[in-house]
Image: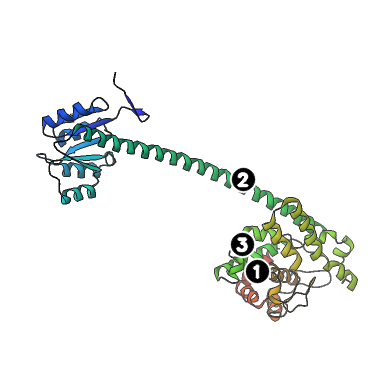
Amino acid sequence: MKNYLRWGELMKTIFVVDDNTINLLTAKEVLSDQYKVITLLSASIMFEFLDNVIPDLILLDIMMPELDGFGALKRLRADKRYAKIPVIFLTSKSDADTEALGFEMGVVDFISKPFSGPVLLNRIKAHLHMESIIHIRTEQLQQKTELLTQQTEILTQRTEQLLRLQNSMTSVLANMVEQRDKLTGNHIERTAAYLNFLLAIMYDKEIYFDEIKDWNVELTVSAARLHDLGKIVVSDSILNKREKLTEDEFNIIKTHTSEGEKIIDGIIRETGDEDFLYSAKLFAGYHHEKWDGTGYPRGLKGLDIPLQGRVMAIADVYDALVSERPYKKAFTHDEAVEIIKTGRGTQFDPIIVDVFIEVSDLFREVALCR
């Protein structure tokens, strides 16, 4: 009984196309024990069979009347249904130009006529085995690609869930601060919006780009919402005092920067989320530092102040200026802009002040929506 399994597949089909009946009979005799062989006297007949049977390999004579091997090969390669069928040329004419043209058109091999049975069989085995390996490798690659796609989708979903959870926790903590500090009213959301405008221009113009190029803007803006987290430890009587603070009371208020750092440090120790929380810690601890070194809590100067603190300083001060307090009236937008301009190079990073001036009209729109 014939063996109908080859390399894990059903018995493969071979078309032998030649106008010489002796060549067809010889090929069938050599190959029929291991392959399903269909012999065809012309390329035209071959294309009629192709409408119903797609072979695994075609042995194609070059010198045939009407449609020769090259013409048939060109037609095969032009049809997407047949373009990938491996073709071996059978030829009694072996020269460099013929072989070069054949390989250029996509033939996989040449077998000289009259052909030797063992040579014919071994050549076909080699090509079909290679096709099987390629097919298996392609399937394996497709399976791995599909698995990788599924894993990527799962990772993306988990990342989105984590981001939503992170934003939710940030909002809860920020709202706790705002509910206690009844005088600032949505200060946290407005400063986050201001910060977003500043960072967008800084990215666009590559300002401090070595520092911000790796920042995730969404996460950075979310982290900025925790800049006043330390106010949780300040008493209500001081936080909501309607009269001007005494010096001692102001000194207590100033501790919200270092207290915020301590709280966030504690969260980092528990969760290990370094990127988001480390950025939040810098916003909390440095947004009251001043460019000339007269700020708090550390009295840092110039570029020694982390960039998070230098950017937040402008957003924070602008919002304080245009907001009404029991002890002061709100400045107009134009007045606030002039005050920040005056602080260029003393209270604020001069480069970031220039960015602020460029987007100040956007600040006005946010402030009007209070």
SS state under label 1: helix
Side of 62 relative to 234 (left or right)? left
Q: Is residue 165 shown left or right of residue 75? A: right
Q: Nearer the viewer, residue 262 or 229?
A: 262
Residue 363: numbered disc = 1
Q: Position of residue 342 (x, y in %)?
A: 70, 81
- The residue where tag 2 is placed is 158
Q: Residue at x 29, y 37 (%)?
A: 126
Secondary element type, mark 3: loop
Disc 2 vs disc 1: which is toward the camera? Answer: 2
Q: Is residue 140 left or right of residue 325?
A: left
Q: Pick the residue in front: 179 or 77.
A: 77
Q: How dense is the environment of label 2, judged by Cα within 10 Å: few (below 14), some, or many (20 and up)? A: few
Report the front residue among 10 and 238: 10
Residues at marks 2 and 1, CA–CA distance in whole angstroms: 34 Å
Mark closest to the chain's N terminus, 1 or 3: 3
Label 1 crowd bin: few (<14), some (14–19), many (20+), radius 10 Å? many
Q: Earlier in the sequence, mark 3 or mark 2?
A: 2
Disc 2, SS: helix
Three-letter amino acid code at disc 2?
Answer: Arg
Q: Residues within 10 Å of mark 3 (few under 14, many from 20)?
A: some
Give the residue furthest to the top. Answer: 1
Locate residue 40: give its quadrant: top left
Residue 361 position, x and y percent, is 62, 71
Q: Are circles 3 and 2 on residues that touch, CB within 8 Å?
A: no
Residue indicated by mark 3: 215
* Badge 3 amino acid: Trp
Q: Position of residue 133 (x, y in %)?
A: 37, 38
Q: CA distance from mark 3 to mark 2?
A: 20 Å
Q: Residue 90 vs residue 261: left or right?
A: left
